[in-house]
Image: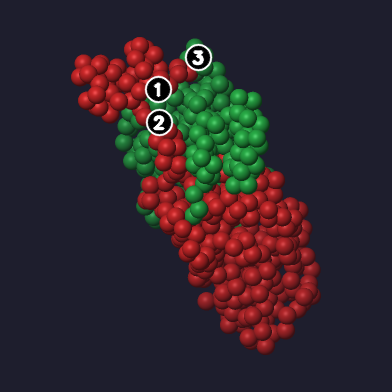
Chain colours: A red, B green
Amino acid sequence: MKPKTTMKSIAEELGVSVSTVSKALKDNPRISKETRKKIQAFSKLLNYQPDARAINLRKNVSKVIGVVIPEITNHFFTTVIKGIDYMTKKRGYQVMICLSNESYIEEVKNIKLLTSGSVDGLLISISSGTQKKGHYDHLFNIKNNHLPMVLFDRTEDFIGCDMVKADDIGGAYNATKTLIKSGCKRIALINFKPYINIGKERKMGYCMALDEYGIKENRSLIFEVDEEKDLFKQIEKIFNLNPLPDAIFAVKEDFAAIAIKLALKKGLKIPEDISLISFVNGLISEYSSPSITAVIQHGYNMGKMAAELLIDRIENKTTKKPYETKVIATRLKHRDSTKK
Amino acid sequence: MKPKTTMKSIAEELGVSVSTVSKALKDNPRISKETRKKIQAFSKLLNYQPDARAINLRKNVSKVIGVVIPEITNHFFTTVIKGIDYMTKKRGYQVMICLSNESYIEEVKNIKLLTSGSVDGLLISISSGTQKKGHYDHLFNIKNNHLPMVLFDRTEDFIGCDMVKADDIGGAYNATKTLIKSGCKRIALINFKPYINIGKERKMGYCMALDEYGIKENRSLIFEVDEEKDLFKQIEKIFNLNPLPDAIFAVKEDFAAIAIKLALKKGLKIPEDISLISFVNGLISEYSSPSITAVIQHGYNMGKMAAELLIDRIENKTTKKPYETKVIATRLKHRDSTKK
């Protein structure tokens, strides 16, 4: 690789000082016209481009926003990134995306890398590893260092910062209510392990709907699955119940798609024998056969709103504005896994 | 937002020069012990952290790699990113990901942003918009500026740089051969529009397999779809053929999943009446019912190899090493859409 052309290399090549090169490139009349022309022509010849890092360093801004997401192969997070990308470009920022891969250690490393001076602010969705451990010092440190930060989707209230999240309670409530109104009474819930915050809230919405229609919460219908273990084996237990449930509400679309595969294998008809609704409206819900009725979380809007909140915080150089939590209303997308 | 602590702000606060602060923080004995201790204690109190950008700027490296991908909500590209992320972290680099959203203009803008001094090299997968337009000046410019670059997946030979790609010809050849060997003779091909390079190669593999088994290429069985238009309408035409094809080979998994939905709607049995194989082994192939036999491209390995090639090129500061093209062999994942 040939070294990059810098003011220093131009100065060395022409036997002048760096300061002369700098002034000549700004067409400063304190440098003789002849020297200016020579330096300008030579810089053009060598394809010299001013270094954006140097300019930003002088201004003490990087115009870069760091994003930490738990899982890149999760369709929902990719739609959030699309929204973040749209808004950051619109406001003149670049995005640096890091992946925690649901690991606490990786999340800490990502944040260390990003905060070593190269970002103006952070957008973070907390990994399940961090929620399982319950260690949040790395997030409090960001606050202590006065670096603007917005949490999205996987949030924790006690950190004390701006947040954007889907209405997990309302989305689950509406999904469950839709199943009840279509005639279902024994509604199984496939949930995350209890340390995942969004799972707690989705269960809350499920229970609220049952309660409203006088259906008693039945603990044998609630399945908490561990994503690190075989999902098929864990979800198959639903079909050992006697009597079988007449509906399933899953908090994640791959849980629902696996339930569909297992139900079809058992010879059950969907939605006649068993109805399904899933949280997360991604590729799996759309392309599964039958397609899955799903809760739309508006990931693209979530990304746009989170980026906007962060950039407003970065550009408004006071700490006086109180922290905001934006809750995005969900919507149900009706497909073939529920009765019309 | 409270301003960040810098050497300048420490110097101002303590009434000393920036140079004194710098020396004191390096424990330089030319500064009196008392002053050193005072400056070090004060810096600690204010949570001063040296700016990685300043250090890297002095070395004329950023330790950041720019990645330009056409589409973030495409599962294949997310697996490539996972591989890139793994390798860059291992080699001590950060990743800055930009999205071209399949647009030539966005791709040009991404590259302009990334090359304004803030990356040591680029990993690029060319957008369909660029391939459609056939404009490649922005890629030649990267070469002219001596910035290391590796193209992955969507590549163009004539650019002249390191490349990593899947064996698109071999993968399509094996898929088609598998269909023929299971007894299929009328194999429809759902392909991209012809300006997409990987589509040309996949068609070549399809034709090679037909030719090997003495099956004449039948142009009425080849469907080139435009992803910007309604895919259901375009793919539905396959089922108007008389006689119907006995197999479909799709170059992308959502094409295959749509074909499955349409086939089931027509009352066809899969794989008894019609078999399907798809390129791309992602979430859709896995969760579709029936699940889809698919060509695995090893996206994770592609990402790792592309990042490794790039970092080797960055750290080996000569242009002498000839450009390499690494072709990754594919593998067929057998599922329920083909006969055993």
Mark 1 belongs to which amino acid? Thr
Are tags 2 and 3 found on a single chain? Answer: no
Residue A320 or A168: which is nearer the viewer? A320
Residue B289 or A4: which is nearer the viewer? A4
Return the residue found at the far bottom: A214
- Determine if residue B165 is in view: no
In the rendered structure, find residue A6 and report the number of the disc placed on it: 1
Q: Chain of mark 2?
A: A
Q: Characterize the local packing of mark 1: few (<14), some (14-19) or many (20 or more) Cα atoms within 10 angstroms.
A: some
Q: Position of residue A12 (x, y in %)?
A: 39, 14
Q: Earlier in the sequence, mark 2 or mark 1?
A: 1
Q: Are marks 2 and 1 in contact (CB under 8 Å)?
A: yes
Residue B77 or B337: which is nearer the viewer? B77
Q: CA distance from mark 2 to mark 1?
A: 8 Å
A156 on left or right of B191: right
Secondary element under disc 1, as helix, strand or loop, is loop
Q: CA distance from mark 1 to mark 3?
A: 18 Å
Residue B228 or B54: which is nearer the viewer? B54
Mark 3 belongs to which amino acid? Thr
- Up-down: is B179 above or below A37? below
Q: Quickly name the residue at label 3.
A: B318
- Up-down: is B338 above or below B53? below
Q: Quickly name the residue at label 2.
A: A51
Q: Position of residue A286 (x, y in %)?
A: 52, 59
Q: Chain of mark 3?
A: B
